[in-house]
Amino acid sequence: MYLYNEKLDIDVDLLQTALFLHSEVEYLFELGEIFGKESLLKFLDIFEGQVIRVPSEQELTTSVKYVIIWRSIKTKERTVKELAEDLCLEEEEVRGVYKEVDKKMKKLGIS
């Protein structure tokens, strides 16, 4: 929705302006640019009032590694010993990762 500003001779995007004015929420304006208006409004509708933590690239990389460990053991594609050797981990650490991920996957109905 736009509002024409005669003094500046431009159409002012009211959503973008509102996002900019909502200054206590960091990056809301940037999220609007990334998602687009419709997706941002849906995002805000679903997550309003929530605090969202964005994981670091390292955390995501670790999570992917953990899922690969879980899948490799679950499908019997590789042994705990093979994974430990390839990933420079102790076998007990690989087993712990598997158990942790398997527990979470079961909560999601995946297993």
Image (cartoon, rainbow, N blue to C red):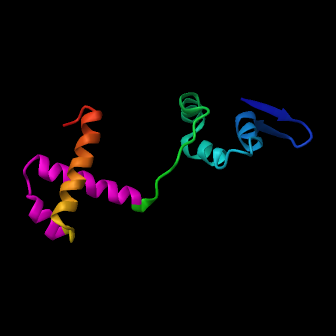
Picture coordinates of residue 50 (x, y %)? 57, 36
Q: Main secondary structure of the magenta part?
A: helix
Image quadrant where residue 49 sits? top right
Question: What is the tally of numbered marks visible in this picture?
Answer: 0
Residue 25 appears left or right of 66: right
Outermost residue toward the front in this view: 92
Quadrant where the C terminus is found in the figure = top left
Give 2 or 38, whichever is nearer the viewer: 38
Res. 68 in view:
no
Instruction: Tell me, yes or no, whether the highlighted magenta stretch contains residue 72.
Output: yes
Residue located 26% across and 48% down the image = 100
Residue 31 position (above or below residue 63)? above
Outermost residue toward the right in this view: 7
Residue located 25% across and 41% down the image = 103
Residue 69 position (above or below residue 37)? below
Give 42 or 48, whichever is nearer the viewer: 48
Give 9 or 31, whichever is nearer the viewer: 31
Residue located 64% across and 49% down the image = 27
Res. 91 in view:
yes
Quadrant where the N terminus is found in the figure = top right
Picture coordinates of residue 85 (x, y %)? 14, 70
Instruction: Tell me, yes or no, whether the highlighted magenta stretch contains residue 111.
Output: no
Residue 52 position (above or below residue 55)? above
Picture coordinates of residue 65 (x, y %)? 27, 58
Q: Magenta part of the protein: which range?
A: 59-86
Residue 22 appears left or right of 60: right
Residue 32 appears left or right of 2: left
